[in-house]
Amino acid sequence: MSELVLSAWSAVSPYGVGTEAFTEGITTARSAVGELDTEAYPGPFDRCGLVPDFTAAEYVGKKGTRTMDRVTAIAVTAVGRLLASCDDALTEAPEQVALVLGTGSGSVQSIMDFTKDSLQGERPYHVDPSRFPNTVMNRAAGSSAIWHGIKGPNTTVAGGSLTGLLALSYAVRLHRGGHCARVLCGAAEEYSTQRAWLEWHGRTPEERDTPLGEGSAVFLLESAEDAQAAGRGALAKILTTRFRAYGEPAEAGEALAACVRGALETSGVAPENVRLVAPLGVGGTLAEKLEETAVTDALGAARPEWIRCRPLLGDTSAAATSLQLAAVLAAAGGSGLGPGEAALVTGIERDGTVGCAVLGGAGSRA
Protein backbone atom coordinates (compact mmCIF):
# COMPACT_ATOMS: atom_id res chain seq x y z
CA MET A 1 0.00 0.00 0.00
CA SER A 2 1.40 3.37 -1.02
CA GLU A 3 2.56 5.69 1.73
CA LEU A 4 0.34 8.75 2.15
CA VAL A 5 1.96 12.05 2.94
CA LEU A 6 1.08 15.64 3.72
CA SER A 7 2.87 17.67 1.06
CA ALA A 8 1.38 21.17 1.43
CA TRP A 9 -0.77 23.11 3.86
CA SER A 10 -2.38 26.46 4.50
CA ALA A 11 -3.82 28.24 7.52
CA VAL A 12 -6.19 31.06 8.31
CA SER A 13 -5.82 31.85 11.99
CA PRO A 14 -5.86 34.58 14.62
CA TYR A 15 -2.27 35.26 13.52
CA GLY A 16 -3.56 36.26 10.09
CA VAL A 17 -4.11 34.73 6.66
CA GLY A 18 -1.31 32.49 5.43
CA THR A 19 1.22 29.93 6.61
CA GLU A 20 3.95 32.52 7.20
CA ALA A 21 1.97 34.38 9.85
CA PHE A 22 0.89 31.11 11.48
CA THR A 23 4.42 29.70 11.53
CA GLU A 24 5.85 32.87 13.05
CA GLY A 25 3.19 32.94 15.75
CA ILE A 26 3.48 29.27 16.69
CA THR A 27 7.26 29.07 16.68
CA THR A 28 7.58 32.17 18.88
CA ALA A 29 4.64 31.08 21.12
CA ARG A 30 3.03 34.48 20.67
CA SER A 31 -0.56 34.72 21.88
CA ALA A 32 -3.03 35.89 19.24
CA VAL A 33 -5.89 36.23 21.73
CA GLY A 34 -6.89 39.85 22.23
CA GLU A 35 -9.60 42.13 23.51
CA LEU A 36 -12.96 41.62 21.79
CA ASP A 37 -15.05 44.51 20.49
CA THR A 38 -18.12 43.83 22.57
CA GLU A 39 -20.20 46.27 20.55
CA ALA A 40 -19.61 44.29 17.39
CA TYR A 41 -19.70 40.95 19.25
CA PRO A 42 -21.90 41.28 22.34
CA GLY A 43 -21.80 38.16 24.43
CA PRO A 44 -20.29 36.43 27.45
CA PHE A 45 -16.61 36.72 26.39
CA ASP A 46 -14.47 39.85 26.34
CA ARG A 47 -11.42 38.19 24.73
CA CYS A 48 -11.14 36.12 21.55
CA GLY A 49 -8.74 34.83 18.93
CA LEU A 50 -10.26 36.46 15.83
CA VAL A 51 -8.75 36.34 12.34
CA PRO A 52 -7.67 39.99 12.09
CA ASP A 53 -9.53 42.24 9.63
CA PHE A 54 -11.03 39.27 7.84
CA THR A 55 -13.95 39.72 5.43
CA ALA A 56 -15.19 37.64 2.53
CA ALA A 57 -15.00 40.63 0.19
CA GLU A 58 -11.33 41.21 1.04
CA TYR A 59 -10.04 37.66 0.79
CA VAL A 60 -12.51 35.85 -1.47
CA GLY A 61 -13.69 38.75 -3.64
CA LYS A 62 -16.68 41.05 -3.84
CA LYS A 63 -18.45 39.10 -6.58
CA GLY A 64 -20.75 36.37 -5.27
CA THR A 65 -19.90 36.83 -1.60
CA ARG A 66 -22.63 39.20 -0.40
CA THR A 67 -24.44 36.42 1.46
CA MET A 68 -21.42 34.21 2.21
CA ASP A 69 -21.11 33.48 5.93
CA ARG A 70 -17.87 33.80 7.85
CA VAL A 71 -16.96 30.12 8.25
CA THR A 72 -17.48 29.54 4.52
CA ALA A 73 -15.31 32.53 3.64
CA ILE A 74 -12.58 31.29 5.99
CA ALA A 75 -12.70 27.80 4.43
CA VAL A 76 -12.75 29.09 0.83
CA THR A 77 -9.74 31.27 1.64
CA ALA A 78 -7.78 28.43 3.24
CA VAL A 79 -8.46 26.06 0.33
CA GLY A 80 -7.56 28.78 -2.18
CA ARG A 81 -4.28 29.52 -0.42
CA LEU A 82 -3.35 25.85 -0.47
CA LEU A 83 -4.11 25.49 -4.18
CA ALA A 84 -2.19 28.68 -4.95
CA SER A 85 0.90 27.22 -3.27
CA CYS A 86 0.84 24.23 -5.63
CA ASP A 87 1.25 24.08 -9.39
CA ASP A 88 -1.73 24.15 -11.75
CA ALA A 89 -1.33 20.43 -12.44
CA LEU A 90 -2.98 19.71 -9.09
CA THR A 91 -6.41 20.55 -10.52
CA GLU A 92 -5.87 19.45 -14.13
CA ALA A 93 -8.08 16.45 -13.35
CA PRO A 94 -10.51 18.08 -10.87
CA GLU A 95 -12.69 14.99 -10.64
CA GLN A 96 -9.74 13.15 -9.07
CA VAL A 97 -9.32 15.73 -6.29
CA ALA A 98 -11.47 15.22 -3.19
CA LEU A 99 -12.28 17.66 -0.40
CA VAL A 100 -12.93 16.59 3.19
CA LEU A 101 -13.75 19.53 5.44
CA GLY A 102 -14.59 19.44 9.12
CA THR A 103 -16.99 21.84 10.79
CA GLY A 104 -18.93 22.23 14.02
CA SER A 105 -22.52 22.95 13.04
CA GLY A 106 -21.68 24.97 9.97
CA SER A 107 -22.44 28.62 10.69
CA VAL A 108 -24.32 28.82 14.00
CA GLN A 109 -24.99 32.50 13.35
CA SER A 110 -26.60 31.79 9.97
CA ILE A 111 -28.79 29.02 11.38
CA MET A 112 -30.03 31.16 14.26
CA ASP A 113 -30.51 34.31 12.18
CA PHE A 114 -32.52 32.43 9.56
CA THR A 115 -34.67 30.75 12.22
CA LYS A 116 -35.23 34.09 13.94
CA ASP A 117 -36.39 35.69 10.68
CA SER A 118 -38.88 32.88 10.10
CA LEU A 119 -40.34 33.35 13.59
CA GLN A 120 -40.41 37.15 13.68
CA GLY A 121 -41.51 37.83 10.10
CA GLU A 122 -45.10 38.47 9.16
CA ARG A 123 -45.11 35.02 7.54
CA PRO A 124 -42.76 32.10 8.29
CA TYR A 125 -41.70 32.05 4.65
CA HIS A 126 -40.82 35.76 4.55
CA VAL A 127 -37.09 35.04 4.76
CA ASP A 128 -34.19 35.84 2.44
CA PRO A 129 -33.86 32.68 0.31
CA SER A 130 -30.32 33.62 -0.71
CA ARG A 131 -29.21 33.02 2.87
CA PHE A 132 -30.74 29.57 3.20
CA PRO A 133 -27.62 27.75 1.87
CA ASN A 134 -25.69 29.10 4.86
CA THR A 135 -27.88 27.07 7.21
CA VAL A 136 -26.73 23.65 5.98
CA MET A 137 -23.68 21.98 7.49
CA ASN A 138 -21.93 21.28 4.18
CA ARG A 139 -22.10 24.88 2.95
CA ALA A 140 -18.38 25.52 3.55
CA ALA A 141 -17.20 22.32 1.86
CA GLY A 142 -19.57 22.69 -1.09
CA SER A 143 -18.74 26.34 -1.67
CA SER A 144 -14.99 25.69 -1.41
CA ALA A 145 -15.23 23.00 -4.07
CA ILE A 146 -17.39 25.10 -6.39
CA TRP A 147 -15.28 28.22 -5.93
CA HIS A 148 -12.03 26.41 -6.80
CA GLY A 149 -13.31 23.90 -9.36
CA ILE A 150 -12.82 20.75 -7.29
CA LYS A 151 -15.09 18.03 -8.66
CA GLY A 152 -14.12 14.90 -6.73
CA PRO A 153 -15.84 13.48 -3.64
CA ASN A 154 -16.97 16.22 -1.27
CA THR A 155 -17.47 15.36 2.40
CA THR A 156 -18.32 17.28 5.55
CA VAL A 157 -17.27 15.81 8.90
CA ALA A 158 -18.43 16.99 12.33
CA GLY A 159 -17.07 15.56 15.58
CA GLY A 160 -16.55 18.31 18.12
CA SER A 161 -12.98 19.16 19.01
CA LEU A 162 -11.70 15.98 17.31
CA THR A 163 -13.19 17.01 13.96
CA GLY A 164 -9.82 17.71 12.32
CA LEU A 165 -8.46 14.27 13.21
CA LEU A 166 -11.68 12.59 12.08
CA ALA A 167 -11.48 14.46 8.76
CA LEU A 168 -7.89 13.30 8.32
CA SER A 169 -8.84 9.69 9.07
CA TYR A 170 -11.72 9.87 6.58
CA ALA A 171 -9.46 11.41 3.94
CA VAL A 172 -6.99 8.52 4.31
CA ARG A 173 -9.77 5.95 3.85
CA LEU A 174 -11.16 7.86 0.86
CA HIS A 175 -7.79 7.82 -0.88
CA ARG A 176 -6.96 4.22 -0.05
CA GLY A 177 -10.40 3.18 -1.26
CA GLY A 178 -9.46 4.43 -4.71
CA HIS A 179 -12.04 7.21 -4.82
CA CYS A 180 -9.55 9.97 -5.67
CA ALA A 181 -5.92 10.65 -6.49
CA ARG A 182 -5.47 13.48 -3.99
CA VAL A 183 -7.42 14.85 -1.04
CA LEU A 184 -7.63 18.31 0.44
CA CYS A 185 -8.60 17.86 4.09
CA GLY A 186 -8.93 20.07 7.12
CA ALA A 187 -11.45 21.94 9.24
CA ALA A 188 -12.84 25.43 9.77
CA GLU A 189 -14.59 27.33 12.55
CA GLU A 190 -15.97 30.87 12.91
CA TYR A 191 -16.51 33.14 15.88
CA SER A 192 -19.95 34.65 16.39
CA THR A 193 -22.03 35.89 19.30
CA GLN A 194 -24.38 32.95 18.80
CA ARG A 195 -21.59 30.39 18.99
CA ALA A 196 -20.19 32.18 22.06
CA TRP A 197 -23.45 31.81 23.98
CA LEU A 198 -23.79 28.14 23.03
CA GLU A 199 -20.23 27.45 24.17
CA TRP A 200 -20.79 29.41 27.40
CA HIS A 201 -23.87 27.44 28.38
CA GLY A 202 -22.25 24.14 27.47
CA ARG A 203 -19.15 24.71 29.59
CA THR A 204 -18.32 24.21 33.23
CA PRO A 205 -17.41 27.36 35.20
CA GLU A 206 -13.68 26.61 34.97
CA GLU A 207 -13.90 26.07 31.20
CA ARG A 208 -15.44 29.52 30.75
CA ASP A 209 -12.09 31.11 31.53
CA THR A 210 -10.76 29.98 28.13
CA PRO A 211 -11.61 32.46 25.34
CA LEU A 212 -12.83 31.26 21.97
CA GLY A 213 -10.97 31.40 18.68
CA GLU A 214 -11.57 30.78 14.99
CA GLY A 215 -9.67 29.72 11.91
CA SER A 216 -8.97 26.95 9.45
CA ALA A 217 -6.15 24.65 8.40
CA VAL A 218 -6.20 22.63 5.18
CA PHE A 219 -3.70 20.00 3.99
CA LEU A 220 -2.87 18.24 0.74
CA LEU A 221 -2.81 14.47 1.20
CA GLU A 222 -1.40 12.34 -1.61
CA SER A 223 0.82 9.36 -2.24
CA ALA A 224 4.54 9.82 -1.73
CA GLU A 225 5.09 8.96 -5.40
CA ASP A 226 2.64 11.63 -6.61
CA ALA A 227 4.18 14.22 -4.31
CA GLN A 228 7.65 13.44 -5.59
CA ALA A 229 6.51 13.52 -9.22
CA ALA A 230 4.98 16.94 -8.68
CA GLY A 231 8.14 18.27 -7.04
CA ARG A 232 6.59 18.53 -3.60
CA GLY A 233 8.49 17.25 -0.62
CA ALA A 234 6.83 15.00 1.92
CA LEU A 235 6.39 17.16 5.03
CA ALA A 236 5.08 14.22 7.04
CA LYS A 237 3.78 10.72 6.51
CA ILE A 238 0.39 9.74 7.86
CA LEU A 239 1.34 6.73 9.93
CA THR A 240 -1.99 6.18 11.70
CA THR A 241 -5.02 7.73 13.35
CA ARG A 242 -6.85 6.10 16.24
CA PHE A 243 -9.96 6.82 18.33
CA ARG A 244 -11.55 5.36 21.46
CA ALA A 245 -14.63 6.02 23.57
CA TYR A 246 -14.91 6.50 27.31
CA GLY A 247 -17.83 6.56 29.75
CA GLU A 248 -17.11 8.71 32.77
CA PRO A 249 -14.93 11.85 32.53
CA ALA A 250 -12.34 10.33 34.87
CA GLU A 251 -11.85 7.48 32.36
CA ALA A 252 -10.76 9.80 29.55
CA GLY A 253 -7.07 9.72 30.48
CA GLU A 254 -6.89 5.94 30.54
CA ALA A 255 -8.68 5.78 27.17
CA LEU A 256 -6.26 8.27 25.59
CA ALA A 257 -3.18 6.53 26.99
CA ALA A 258 -4.37 3.25 25.46
CA CYS A 259 -5.15 5.09 22.23
CA VAL A 260 -1.65 6.58 22.00
CA ARG A 261 0.09 3.31 22.92
CA GLY A 262 -1.90 1.45 20.28
CA ALA A 263 -1.17 4.08 17.64
CA LEU A 264 2.57 4.03 18.34
CA GLU A 265 2.63 0.22 18.26
CA THR A 266 0.65 0.09 15.01
CA SER A 267 2.92 2.62 13.32
CA GLY A 268 6.13 1.10 14.64
CA VAL A 269 7.22 4.33 16.33
CA ALA A 270 9.31 4.15 19.49
CA PRO A 271 8.27 6.73 22.11
CA GLU A 272 11.77 8.24 22.18
CA ASN A 273 11.42 9.12 18.47
CA VAL A 274 8.42 11.38 19.09
CA ARG A 275 9.83 14.88 18.57
CA LEU A 276 6.66 16.96 18.78
CA VAL A 277 3.39 16.64 20.71
CA ALA A 278 0.40 18.92 20.08
CA PRO A 279 -2.35 18.31 22.67
CA LEU A 280 -5.85 19.75 22.52
CA GLY A 281 -5.94 21.04 26.12
CA VAL A 282 -9.12 22.39 27.71
CA GLY A 283 -8.13 25.50 29.61
CA GLY A 284 -6.69 24.06 32.82
CA THR A 285 -9.60 21.69 33.34
CA LEU A 286 -9.57 18.06 34.44
CA ALA A 287 -9.61 16.95 30.79
CA GLU A 288 -6.44 18.91 30.05
CA LYS A 289 -4.63 17.42 33.04
CA LEU A 290 -5.80 13.94 32.11
CA GLU A 291 -4.64 14.47 28.52
CA GLU A 292 -1.12 15.54 29.44
CA THR A 293 -0.77 12.80 32.03
CA ALA A 294 -2.00 10.19 29.56
CA VAL A 295 0.42 11.25 26.83
CA THR A 296 3.32 11.48 29.28
CA ASP A 297 2.58 8.00 30.60
CA ALA A 298 2.31 6.58 27.08
CA LEU A 299 5.63 8.11 26.03
CA GLY A 300 7.46 7.00 29.17
CA ALA A 301 10.93 8.54 29.48
CA ALA A 302 10.67 10.41 26.17
CA ARG A 303 10.86 14.20 26.40
CA PRO A 304 9.33 15.69 23.24
CA GLU A 305 8.65 19.35 22.55
CA TRP A 306 5.06 20.27 23.47
CA ILE A 307 3.10 22.71 21.31
CA ARG A 308 0.10 24.07 23.18
CA CYS A 309 -2.16 25.85 20.70
CA ARG A 310 -5.17 26.68 22.85
CA PRO A 311 -3.48 29.36 25.01
CA LEU A 312 -2.22 30.98 21.79
CA LEU A 313 -5.31 30.76 19.57
CA GLY A 314 -8.24 30.29 21.96
CA ASP A 315 -10.70 27.43 21.78
CA THR A 316 -11.14 26.93 18.04
CA SER A 317 -13.57 24.04 18.56
CA ALA A 318 -14.05 22.10 15.29
CA ALA A 319 -10.86 23.56 13.80
CA ALA A 320 -8.72 22.79 16.86
CA THR A 321 -7.04 19.51 15.91
CA SER A 322 -6.45 20.67 12.33
CA LEU A 323 -4.69 23.75 13.68
CA GLN A 324 -2.72 21.48 16.04
CA LEU A 325 -1.63 19.47 13.01
CA ALA A 326 -0.65 22.69 11.24
CA ALA A 327 1.31 23.72 14.33
CA VAL A 328 3.29 20.47 14.14
CA LEU A 329 4.20 21.17 10.51
CA ALA A 330 5.08 24.77 11.35
CA ALA A 331 7.37 23.65 14.19
CA ALA A 332 8.94 20.93 12.03
CA GLY A 333 10.18 23.56 9.56
CA GLY A 334 10.05 23.93 5.80
CA SER A 335 11.40 20.46 5.07
CA GLY A 336 9.02 18.74 7.48
CA LEU A 337 9.77 15.98 9.95
CA GLY A 338 13.19 14.42 9.52
CA PRO A 339 14.13 10.75 9.03
CA GLY A 340 13.14 8.71 12.05
CA GLU A 341 11.25 11.59 13.68
CA ALA A 342 7.60 11.40 14.66
CA ALA A 343 4.91 13.76 15.91
CA LEU A 344 1.76 13.17 17.92
CA VAL A 345 -1.51 15.12 17.85
CA THR A 346 -4.02 14.29 20.60
CA GLY A 347 -7.37 15.34 21.96
CA ILE A 348 -10.11 14.52 24.46
CA GLU A 349 -13.63 15.46 23.40
CA ARG A 350 -15.97 16.17 26.31
CA ASP A 351 -18.76 14.10 24.77
CA GLY A 352 -16.93 10.80 25.31
CA THR A 353 -14.26 10.25 22.64
CA VAL A 354 -10.49 10.52 22.48
CA GLY A 355 -8.26 10.47 19.45
CA CYS A 356 -4.72 10.83 18.16
CA ALA A 357 -2.70 10.92 14.97
CA VAL A 358 0.89 9.81 14.53
CA LEU A 359 2.96 11.47 11.82
CA GLY A 360 6.40 10.40 10.66
CA GLY A 361 9.27 11.87 8.70
CA ALA A 362 11.02 10.54 5.60
CA GLY A 363 12.33 7.08 6.29
CA SER A 364 9.82 6.37 9.07
CA ARG A 365 8.22 2.97 8.90
CA ALA A 366 4.46 3.01 8.10
Image: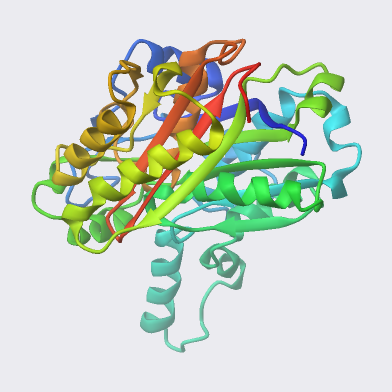
Quadrant of residue 249 within the rendered picture: bottom left
Residue 150 image offset from top left, x and y in percent: 79, 47
The residue positioned 48% from the left and 31% from the top of the image is: 325
Q: Is 258 placed left or right of 100 in the picture?
A: left
Q: Is residue 105 visible?
A: yes
Instruction: Looking at the picture, tell me which residue is in the foreground, 269 or 21.
Output: 269
In the current view of this chain or complex, which residue is farthest to the left? 205
Quadrant of the snapshot with the C terminus: top right
Instruction: Looking at the picture, tell me which residue is in the foreground, 159 or 263.
Output: 263
Residue 205 image offset from top left, x and y in percent: 8, 52
Residue 312 image offset from top left, x and y in percent: 30, 26
Q: Is residue 65 visible?
A: no
Q: Is 124 placed left or right of 141 in the picture?
A: left
In the current view of this chain or complex, which residue is farthest to the bottom? 123
Residue 98 image offset from top left, x and y in percent: 74, 48
Colour setup of the view:
rainbow
